[in-house]
Image (cartoon, helix red, strand yellow):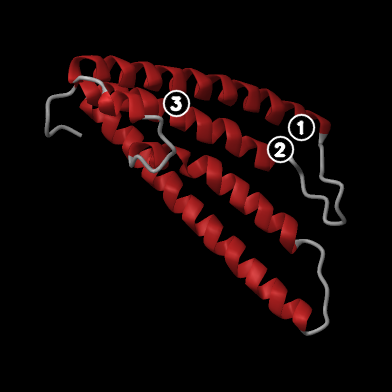
Amino acid sequence: MERFVRVVDRLGTACAAIASVMLALAALVITWNVIYRAMGASTYWEIEFSVYMMVAALFLASPYCLRTNGHVAVDLLSYYLPKRYARPVTVAVAVIGLLVCVYLAYAGGILTVDSFEKGETTESTWAPLKWPLFLTMPVGLALTALQYVAELVRMRLPEGEP
């Protein structure tokens, strides 16, 4: 099980690295756009491209965010409970998070396949396909669900293990 946890952690870290590159790219494109428009030119693709990058980065960075406790956590109750009650609450919250991620990954998969089959594009002048953006939802949330499983396994491992 330690190997499973390490593999999931590495996948999350790799996705976070990809997400950081996507955010940097979005920032560069927006900065370029401001300068380019200040010179009197106009473009039609950069805002939508940047939104695609930021949304994709959000889903892809989700597993890493969970592992590093960077997400918004509802841990006030478990913080004030005695240790014997805090652990079951923490496990219950992780199981609920896991179930939500599995459901949303499934729903995102259906959305992605439907968009792919229809060849949907946005209504903008650039008109990029929608399915590549939608694909980041099931991928990111499925990896987040795996990260929840890894966190549950990590709770059972002796101290000092991954």
Q: Position of residue 126 (x, y in %)?
A: 83, 56
- Label count reads 3
- According to the picture, the residue beneath numbered tag 1 turns out to be 115
Residue 8 appears in the rendering: yes
Rendering coords of residue 87 (x, y %): 25, 19
**Residue 150 seen in this snapshot:** no
Q: Earlier in the sequence, mark 2 or mark 3?
A: 2
Q: Tell me where residue 60 appears, x and y as whole percent.
A: 51, 42
Q: Which mark is residue 131?
A: 2
| Viewer-side label of 1, 3 | 3
Residue at x-position 20% and y-position 19%: 82
Residue 88 in percent (x, y) is at: 28, 14
Which is more toward the observer, 47 or 117? 47
Specify which label sits upstream in the sequence, 2 or 1. 1
Tags 2 and 1 in contact by the CB under 8 Å rule?
Answer: yes
Q: Which residue is mark 3?
A: 145
Q: Quadrant of residue 77?
A: top left
Q: Secondary structure at mark 1?
A: helix
Which amino acid, mark 1?
Ser
Residue at horizontal 40%, vertical 30%? 74
Q: Residue at x 52, y 21 (%)?
A: 100
Q: Secondary structure at mark 3?
A: helix
Of the residues shown, which amino acid type is indicated by label 2?
Answer: Trp
Q: Amino acid at mark 3?
A: Ala
What is the distance, in whole Å, between disc 2 and disc 1 at their CAs?
Answer: 5 Å
Q: Quadrant of the C terminus?
A: top left
Kindly report the distance in space between the C-alpha atoms of the residues bearing marks 1 and 3.
23 Å
Residue in the picture at 64% in, 22% down: 107
Residue 105 in which image quadrant? top right
Query: On the rendered structure, is 66 left or right of 21?
Result: left
Q: Can you tell which mark lies on residue 144?
A: none
Which part of the image, by quadrant, shows the N terminus?
top left
